[in-house]
Image (tube, rainbow, N blue to C red):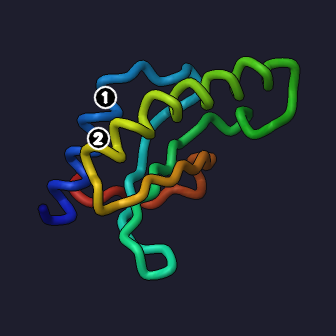
Amino acid sequence: MNDRDTIAKVRDIVARHPLPDFILGLDVRLGDTDGDPAMWLAFQITPDAGHWNADVERRVAAINALEDALFPELLIAFEDRYPYFRYETARHLRPVLGE
C-alpha cells in the first residue's frame, strides 16, 4: 500500500468515529521511529483546547475515549505501522497531501 492509500485508509477509520467538538481536523504523518514504521495522527484542536480550564476533564475523557476506540482498529488495519496520537493547535499543522 502506498502512502496516499495508507493516509486515505487512516482517514476512513477515523471518519467512522465521532470527533469531540474541539477537534477541527486531522493530519496523518507517516515515517518511522527507531527504524520501525509508524504513523502519527495529529488532530487539529481549537486554540483554546490547549488551556487548562474548567473543561479539561471533559476534554481529557473525550481524547481517551477516541484513542481507546481508534488504537485497536489501527493496529489491526496496519500491522506494520504503530499509531501515535498528537494534538496540535491549527498553527502547527502543515497541509496534508491530497487535500
Task: Determine the residue positioned at 45% across, 60% down.
Answer: 94
Residue nearest the viewer, comparing 84 with 75: 75
Instruction: Please report the residue visible at 73 percent of the width from the left and 33 percent of the height from the top.
Output: 48
| Residue that carries the numbered disc 1 in the rendered image | 15
The residue tagged 2 is 11
Name the image quarter holding residue 71: top left
Q: Amino acid at mark 1?
A: Ala
Quarter assignment of residue 9: top left
Q: Could you say where residue 59 lies in the image, as x and y percent from the top left?
A: 69, 24
Crowd class of label 1 (few under 14; some 14 to 19; many from 20; radius 10 Å): few
Q: Residue at x 59, y 38 (%)?
A: 45
Q: Left of 97 or right of it: where is 61?
A: right
Above or below, 19 relative to 87: above
Q: Identify residue type, mark 2.
A: Arg
* Left or right relative to 24: residue 63: right
Instruction: Report, in whole angstroms, how far the alpha carbon at label 2 lies from the one at label 1.
Output: 6 Å
- Residue nearest the viewer, comparing 90 with 83: 83
Q: Position of residue 99 (x, y in %)?
A: 25, 50
Tags 2 and 1 touching, CB below 8 Å? yes
Q: Is residue 31 above or below residue 4?
A: below
